[in-house]
Amino acid sequence: MTAVVPQAAPAAATPHQPMVEAIEVHKRFGSLEVLNGVTMSVERGQVVCLLGPSGSGKSTLLRCINHLEKVDAGMIRVAGETVGYREKNGRLSELREKEVATQRRKVGMVFQRFNLFPHMTALENVMEAPTQVARRSNADARREAIDLLGQVGLADKAETYPAQLSGGQQQRVAIARALAMSPEVMLFDEPTSALDPELVGDVLDVMRALAENGMTMIVVTHEIGFAREVADVAVFMDGGVVVEQGDPRQVLMHPAEERTRSFLSKVL
């Protein structure tokens, strides 16, 4: 099957450049249109929470931002750079995998399932990408990994294997691992959905601290309280489109769209 190269989107008309910009993004799996013209922007230091029912396209949008999925049309830019493609004279050419991997260093991603290497300790999991991908020295990577584990409240678990950690602790190691590559933006795909309720709070506390420290974050979540408290922007998606977006207090407490009101009436 021949890969589809999307058409180039017009460059921003102003010198201001969002940290993440999605422009008329489309993504199809077979006959199913998962993203149907999604446009949104995330400013540097903002926290944006994506809300909506299962199948609305939220997780697919995150995967497109990290080029784990290729868009079929439209454009995504991170820090002003087109994701997965090179723009020249209004035309796009697909980047080589090595170039895509370099782009991905700007973006940290935390999944529902922790995806830790089971044969490595927490410390080794956090050190893996800096040493193997970024080619940092073991000493530097170890020092930074210890610091990151301390930031997520797991300094005492550095030599512990994933199987010996709770789900919440594994997810915090996964956050530290994503931070180890010094990303400019963090993507969270329902990071608490696989956790027992009593373990959710510790993970959300780590995410709050990241937000307070100015990390740009896009969070797919069903944690409405977190979205209301921490997000700068709430985006409600359904059917592959952005139905409503704006100030979280407005969107969550006084939504303008009936579809948003219907969804929130079932989850609040």
Image: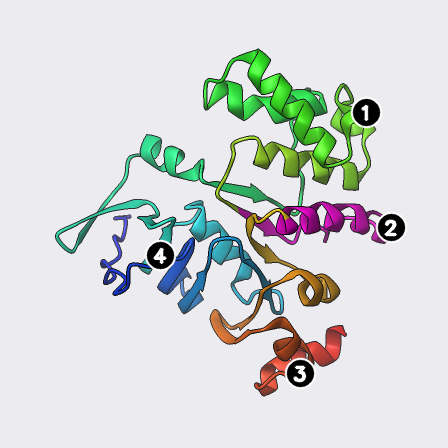
C-alpha span from label 4 to label 2:
40 Å
| For the residues bearing labels 3 and 1, Cβ distance under 8 angstroms | no
Point out the frontmost of discs 3 and 1.
Answer: 1
**Residue drawn at x 67%, y 64% as measured from the top left:** 227
Where does the image place residue 134, in percent across and percent down from the top left?
45, 23
Disc 1, disc 4: CB below 8 Å? no
The tag on residue 26 is none
- Residue 105 appears in view: yes
In the displayed image of the protein, which residue is found farthest to the right?
A: 198
**Residue 212 image position (x, y, % from top left):** 65, 51
Q: Which mark is residue 262?
A: 3
217 to 237, vertically: above or below: above
The Cα atoms of the two marked residues, 2 and 3, are separated by 28 Å
The residue positioned 62% from the left and 79% from the top of the image is 250
Question: Disc 3 versus disc 1: distance between alpha carbons?
Answer: 45 Å
Which residue position holds label 2?
198
Q: Mark 4 highlights which residue?
A: 17
Query: Mark 3–mark 4 contact, CB under 8 Å?
Result: no
Q: Amino acid at mark 4?
A: Gln
Which is more N-terminal, label 2 or label 4? 4
Quadrant of the drawing holding the C terminus: bottom right
Q: CA distance from mark 2 to mark 1?
A: 20 Å
Q: Is residue 57 above or below residue 129?
A: below
Circle nearer the viewer, 2 or 3:
2
Residue under the image location 45 percent in, 46 percent down: 66
Front label number (3 vs 4):
4
Q: Position of residue 115 (x, y in %)?
A: 64, 35
Q: Residues within 10 Å of mark 3 (few under 14, many from 20)?
A: few
Q: Which residue is mark 1?
A: 156
Given contact means CB atoms under 8 Å apart, are the residues at marks 4 and 2 in contact? no
Question: What residue span does the magenta drawing correspond to?
Answer: 186-212
Crowding near pointer 4: few (<14 within 10 Å), some, many (20+)?
Answer: some
